[in-house]
Structure formats: C-alpha cells, structure tokens
Amino acid sequence: MLDDRKLAVLRAIVEDYVSTNEPVGSKALAERHNLKVSPATVRNDMAALEEEGYITQPHTSAGRVPTDKGYRLFVDRLSQIKPLSTAERRAIETFLAGAVDLDDVVTRTVRLLAQLTRQVAVVQYPTLTRSSVRHVELVPLSERRIMLVLITNTGRVEQRVVELPEVIEDPRIAHLRAVLNACLDGCGLADVPDLVADLPERLPVEDRPVVATILSVLLETLVERHDEKIVFAGAANLAGADFTIGLRDVLEALEEQVVLMRLLGETTTDTPTALTVRIGAENPYLHGTSIVATGYGSGDKQLARLGVLGPTRMDYPVTMGAVRAVARYVSQILAAS
Amino acid sequence: MLDDRKLAVLRAIVEDYVSTNEPVGSKALAERHNLKVSPATVRNDMAALEEEGYITQPHTSAGRVPTDKGYRLFVDRLSQIKPLSTAERRAIETFLAGAVDLDDVVTRTVRLLAQLTRQVAVVQYPTLTRSSVRHVELVPLSERRIMLVLITNTGRVEQRVVELPEVIEDPRIAHLRAVLNACLDGCGLADVPDLVADLPERLPVEDRPVVATILSVLLETLVERHDEKIVFAGAANLAGADFTIGLRDVLEALEEQVVLMRLLGETTTDTPTALTVRIGAENPYLHGTSIVATGYGSGDKQLARLGVLGPTRMDYPVTMGAVRAVARYVSQILAAS
DNA sequence: TCTGGCACTCGGTGTTCCCGAGTGCCAAGT
DNA sequence: ACTTGGCACTCGGGAACACCGAGTGCCAGA
C-alpha cells in the first residue's frame, strides 16, 4: 500500500512542515528534497497518503499537513533520534555537575531540558517509595514538639513537626532515635509500614504513646509523598507556539500536578528507559500537544520520569535526542551521589 | 486644579475601564455613574485630566484610558482596599492550616493567592539569614562522606553532602555534632560566620581538617541561600490578560529568579507590612505590568515578601485586599509553628 | 507508471466605503 | 463662571469586493 517513495514523501512533508509551519505543496516538495520525480507524481502519492489518513489539507487547495497518524508513522519508522552535538553534551555535563543537592539536581535538569528543546520541560521528583531509608533523625524543638527528619539514599530529606502527647527529655529522644534507626536503617521505604507495625509492642509500655505518635506522622509522610511532586520550566516557550487548543488550557494543566502526572507517567512501559512519545489525541486531557518522556534514575531501577511537552508540530528527532541525553546524564549524577 | 468632580470622573474612568476593558466615553460615563452633570461637562473635565496626564486616548475620537499616573492617583487617593468576604477568609484559613511543613506553606500560599486574585502570584521563601539555627545534624553516609543537615527556627531544612578528607567513625561524628550544636544552637544565621571563625583552633589538631571541611560547606550553604528562592503560580491567568509587552517577556521574567526578586523586593520600605504597589513603568524590567506586594513573616520581623503580578489594568482594591489578607494569615501560620 | 498540461478552487490580501462612537469647540442658558 | 445642547469633524473597524496565486484533481500521452 505504501511504497518507499510514498514514505519518503511523508517524511519530507513532516520535515518541511515542522521547519516552516506552513502547509507544504507538491511543487515545493519536489524541489527541496531531491525526489527525482515530478510534482504531479508527488501529488498522486499525496492523494494516496491522504486517503490513508496520514496527511490532510486545512482547506481545499492548500498544501498538506501531517495528521497525528502521520507523525506517529514518522516517529516510529521514518526518523532517527538525533544525537546532541559534543558542545551540547559538555554543556549538560558541566551544568548538572554543579548541583549541590537533590532539589538542585531536579531544578537544574528541568531548566536545562527546557532550554535545550525550547519546549516546556517536565520533571518528576524521584519517588520516595522506591528508595530506602538512610537515616531517621529526631530533633527536639520544645518540650512537647520534635522534628522528624527522614533522609533517603537518594539524598532526599523529608521533615515533619510532631506534636507529642507528653513532655519528653533529650536522653529519651536519643534512645528513641537509636531504636528507630536500628529498625529502619537501610530498608526500602515500601517496607517501612510492615517493619514498624509491631514496634510499639516491643517497647516498654511508657514509650508506646510517644512512639505511636511519631510513627503515625512517619507513615503519613510516606503516604503523602507517594504521588510525587512534579516541576516544570520553560513556559515562556509556549508563547510562540500555536496550539490547536488554548494556551490557557496548557498552562492550567502544567500547574495541575495530577494532570501532569498522568501525562508523564501513565504508561510506565516494561522497559522504562525507552522513550515514550505521545502525539496529539493520544494524550489524555491535553489533545493538540505532544509529549516525549522517559524514565530516569540511578542504576537499574527507574526512580521517576522526565520529558518535554510541546505542540504536535515538533522536531521529534531533536527533541527525543535531548530528552534521552538529559535522562542519561541525570541518572549518572544520581548514581554517583 | 483638580476639584472633587474631576477626581470623581477619574475614579469612574478607572473603575469602568477595569471592568469593561474598553476606552470609556463621556456619555456612558455620565449615565452609569450618577454624576448629575451632562456628558459635555464630563468632556471638559476629561480634557483637563488629559492635560494633566492622568488619562489618555488610544486614538483620536475614542474613549479615554487611565495612564500610569492616573492609576497611581486612583490607588493613592481614590480607592479603598476592599476586605475579603467572610467566606473567602474562612477558605484561606482552612486551606493554609492544612500545611505540613514550610515548603507546603509556601506552595499553598502561592496557589491560594493566584486563585484568589486570578493573577500571577509570587512568593519569596523566608530568608535564611534572618532566622536562627535550631539544630545541626551530621549523618554518616559512607566512610568518607556525611550529610550535613541544618534546621532553622522557621522549619526550614537545608542539606548538603560533605566529602571528608579522611575516614571518620561514628563516635567522632557524634562528638563533632555536639561541638557544632553547642557552638551554633539558637544563634542567628547571620552570626554563624563569626562564631565558627576560630572554631578549628579551639579543637584538637587532629579534628581540624575535618571540621574545616564541614564548616566550609556550611558557610557555602548560607551564602548560596542568601538570595532566596521565589516561586510563582497562576501563569494560566496570563492567557486571558493583554499586556502592552509580550506575553513571552512576562513568562520569561517569571522564570528568572533575579528579575522576580527585584520586582518583589527592591524597595523594602521602612514599614514592611505596608502594601507596595508598583504601576506600569514604575517597575524595573517589566513595564506594562503592575505589582502589588507586601512583607510577611512571623511576629514583628519580616521574613520575606509575597505579592501578585498582573496587567496595569487591574482591580487594585480587590487585589490589595487579597494580598494583605493572605500575608496576614500566612504570617499567623508561621508564627504558630 | 510517470509526466505535462489545464481548468478549477479558495484562502489571503489589499482596496474601498461606510457607520458610528466619541471628540472639541462654540454659543446660549443659568 | 460654570454648565449644557448643538454641530461638525475624526478615525478605527467592519463589510463588501475584486484579485492573485499557490495548490489541487484529473486526463491524455509518453
């Protein structure tokens, strides 16, 4: 049905349309890409491609524009991910290497990605539940209030103020800290609920109310952060772009954690390092936009996802290259720390 | 020069223009507000107001539009800050009360303010240097790496990984922790550099390299966070608004910490609880926008600033009311924790 | 199967025209 | 001295219209 030349025509249409933002006609197409056939032949092919739903024309007698289906075929079969230049690679490396803590890594990553792709970049914070406890700290604040600090192996720090049911002195706090750490140190966050379930019963009865209070806050912290924070950057890049849907809708979605989460993570495939590309109507909620995303994280286990969001008319090879490269570098950084 | 009626006319023009977004003419003005004079009289007053530079006309034979100077007069003398409804107050209270830590307070505040004003809200994180040390924690990560955690009285937690020049064991860490806390506990962050300056010399010689390393990281943390983080929300509210300058410029400024900082904090007046209103060209960088800001913080000392950014054509009384109310509530929350 | 030719379509642009809201000014009224 | 009604003038913006040209579909011939 679709011979090689027709595919070449489709590829040419996508490339031209992406770079010019104007419907591309048969004549210009035959000239710019050396297809060695006449415009008339191209027209025939275009008619076939339109018949199959890969391209469409905005109005009668205008050039053709790729459909979602056309972009999909282009991404799947007609394009190659474009690697970054060495200058870009170096820039990424030095920029990310300057990060001082996890927060900084995420912030730098999202800005970097936005600048690199000139799109909106989205980065999910590494998920707590997949990491493990490095240390639990109890800091006395006042007679009946302590601060609970939870440090994970990814460098993440969570803190909560705990109101205690009774007055507590420093030596007891030190003791409780030791007990908690002995129990939790090094274990995966997902296992924490099980591990602490019977902890109060193993302690002297006078400690139980205090420990129970602390544990309830601790568990609450774990649950709350289960669905993780997502940050974005590069909203200014939306100003130029033209979406089929309103700019307002896109901005609203970006500020809505839940929507972002679904856009980014819905299909965590079996091979999470693979790039996920969602085009136009394939997206939940945000039709008219495309998303290029991938997982990242230290070592084998994926911790979270990152990607970019842009108009359907997007330079997929370049964007995919940037997303993949950034994901690799940030994974590397996380693994090292 | 400007009698009462002319001022009334100016007020009417500002109010009408803000609500309709269309240049307001003499006839409509005389009708809608019961000025008890004829359109012709209004025209004379308008001519005088234009002469003085308070209003202007976009083209010959169109209605009048307030100038920056006109808005300024309106804000200073012709309007009263509009208090929130009790329903709104209650909503603020319950929404902010649910915050679990400082991060959460800031996040909730900025969203709340954006929603309340239907503008872009901007909130500066409480400044580290004005708060004091509650606790310093050292957590061993591996043989030669520890995590330095700094907890302040505002509930803020800063953490850094420190690479040590030598292997170190747990008892020594505990000892160093005690030394550091004895030295720093409760003192203002601004005083930290002075207090630790001679600390290495007061310690046994074998501890000095390690302590020096830790202190350098600690001081670095303080310096880095000196200019504080700023977050914003409500970018979607920009989509409808029409700025004289490009939407892109505004979005870029919002993502640029430095610019935001200047917009928000440049003139910290002698009475920081007062509302600061900057109109149009009064703003550094972002002409064509207005900013309503104020300080907030626990107790008497101001910790940081918050505010909203919107088009010059803004409902100042309502916006000012919302900003003031939110600042008060968040101050209250911070004081309580 | 490809190619050149040809008639047809129609979106976008430039031109013209007209309407009406709004103004400024003046002379009369209070 | 201020206010008011009247009146001529301005000019932005929308409607109507014509035109151009890029692009198409189709067909006959190579």
Image (cartoon, coloured by chain):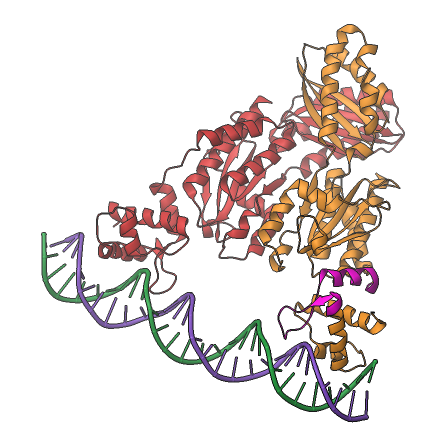
Chain colours: A orange, B red, C green, D purple
Q: Would residue A237 be found to the left or right of residue B198 on screen?
A: left
Residue closer to the observer: B213 or A240: A240
Residue at left offset 71%, top offset 27%: A159
Residue A106 percent coordinates (x, y): 74, 43
Q: In which quarter of the image is residue B103?
A: top right
State which quarter of the image contains the C terminus of chain A.
top right
Q: Can residue A101 be seen in this snapshot?
A: no
Q: Can residue B59 be seen in this snapshot?
A: yes
Q: Would residue A241 be found to the left or right of residue B282 on screen?
A: right
Q: Would residue B156 be found to the left or right of residue B208 on screen?
A: left
| Rendered position, B120 above or below A243 | above
Residue B24 percent coordinates (x, y): 34, 55
Residue closer to the observer: A203 or A144: A203
Q: Magenta region: which residues?
A: A50-79
Residue A21 percent coordinates (x, y): 66, 67
Tell me, yes or no, whether the highlighted magenta stretch contains residue A60: yes
